[in-house]
């Protein structure tokens, strides 16, 4: 799929150039479709004027095929047009009170998320470290040591959506189909490891990475004697962080892994943020809460944190065929175009 998406992106670029230069495309398209990674694939291509009779390029244009991830090209082109290449998503940290002389914030700490999909466990190139670690560093530099109240994540005009309505039901349990909203962390997925128990008849040993993910686990995977075949089946409950496991793990077998699609992204982000703050020596006295609105008015802005520019996010979508970032870009277009809560 990535090879097909890259090829489609290249063809689209060629057509854009050719349209401005009136250059023939047939040979260039044929050379791309003849590449080794694309052998055996099927294509239906048509580039035409919207309001005119001119076709710039066509290959089996009447063949009906499902566009699949090639539609990301239109998503990203729309985001580029509507939002602008240099636009960045902003996350704001604020509170109704200021930090006192002892580093205490005697109120809630509010985090206003603005659709940034670039908070990952892995290091970000432009920051030299994970984004949440850098955000926590910024708050520490402001003198913050402890929050007496809650950490409140506000998702603003973004509504949570659990899967795309045109996907197949089986897709909704996969890691490439997490729920999305104005907040997000680690592509809204959690890596689940399932290994055999200590003795025959024990339930399997299940661990979450990251460990703070709040997933309700229903574990019906039993440990069998060595030599048995290991197998694991799983079900995900849409819009709820609930994972049901069934199957058998034989003693001595290698663990199996599931890429679990997080169903409550804002909570997941809040838990990840609390963890990042704790590692920097900043404690939260209350709970992690989520508000699915724009939150209360606050008088003290503590920190604003920006995403990479949209052009870089688009490059990730088109190179990696990234569903998660594509969904966030599409939601941001909806927020700008309709100026209301969207999913």
Image: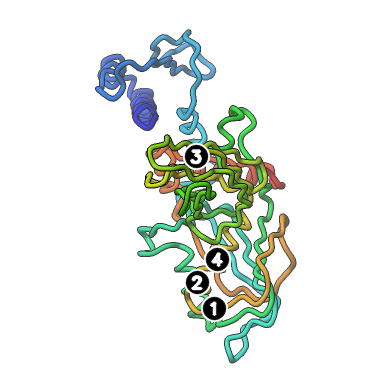
Q: Residue at x 62, y 73 (%)?
A: 301
| Distance from the alpha carbon under mark 4 to that under mark 1 | 11 Å
Residue contact at pointers 2 and 1, CB within 8 angstroms: yes
Rendered position, 306 above or below 31: below
Which residue has dot 1 on it? Answer: 282
Residue contact at pointers 3 and 2, CB within 8 angstroms: no
Coloring scheme of the render?
rainbow
- Tell how many labels: 4
Q: Relative to 207, is 166 on the left or the right?
A: right
Measured as percent of width and height from the top left, residue 319 is found at 37, 39
Whether residue 212 is visible, yes or no, is yes
Q: Relative to 161, is 91 on the left or the right?
A: left
Considering only order in the chain, which callout, 4 or 3, is on the residue closer to the N terminus?
Answer: 3
Residue 273 bears which disc, if any?
Answer: 4
Assign a secondary structure to mark 3.
strand
Which residue has dot 2 on it? Answer: 136
């Amino acid at each position: 799929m990535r090879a097909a998406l890259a090829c489609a992106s290249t063809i689209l670029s060629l057509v854009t150039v050719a349209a401005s230069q009136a250059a023939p495309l047939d040979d260039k398209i044929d050379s791309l479709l003849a590449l080794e990674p694309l052998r055996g694939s099927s294509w239906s291509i048509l580039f035409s004027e919207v309001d005119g009779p001119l076709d710039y390029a066509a290959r089996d244009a009447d063949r009906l095929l499902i566009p699949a991830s090639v539609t990301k090209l239109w998503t990203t082109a729309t985001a580029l047009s509507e939002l602008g290449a240099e636009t960045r998503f902003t996350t704001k940290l604020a509170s109704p009170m200021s930090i006192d002389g002892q580093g205490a914030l005697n109120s809630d700490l509010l985090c206003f998320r603005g659709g940034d999909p670039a908070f990952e466990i892995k290091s970000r190139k432009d920051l030299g470290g994970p984004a949440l670690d850098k955000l926590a560093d910024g708050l520490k530099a402001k003198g913050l040591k402890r929050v007496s109240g809650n950490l409140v994540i506000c998702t603003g005009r973004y509504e949570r959506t659990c899967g795309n309505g045109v996907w197949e039901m089986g897709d909704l349990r996969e890691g490439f189909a997490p729920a999305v909203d104005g907040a997000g962390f680690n592509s809204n997925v959690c890596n689940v490891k399932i290994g055999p128990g200590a003795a025959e008849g024990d339930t399997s040993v299940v661990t979450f990475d990251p460990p703070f993910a709040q997933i309700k686990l229903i574990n019906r995977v039993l440990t069998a004697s060595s030599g048995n075949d290991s197998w694991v089946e799983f079900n995900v409950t849409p819009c709820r962080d609930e994972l049901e496991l069934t199957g058998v793990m034989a003693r001595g077998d290698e663990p199996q892994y599931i890429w679990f699609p997080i169903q409550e992204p804002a909570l997941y982000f809040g838990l990840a943020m609390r963890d990042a703050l704790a590692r920097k020596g900043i404690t939260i006295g209350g709970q992690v809460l989520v508000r699915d609105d724009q939150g209360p008015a606050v008088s003290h802005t503590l920190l604003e944190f920006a995403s990479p520019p949209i052009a870089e996010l688009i490059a990730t979508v088109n190179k990696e065929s990234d569903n998660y970032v594509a969904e966030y870009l599409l939601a941001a277009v909806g927020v700008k175009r309709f100026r209301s809560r969207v999913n």
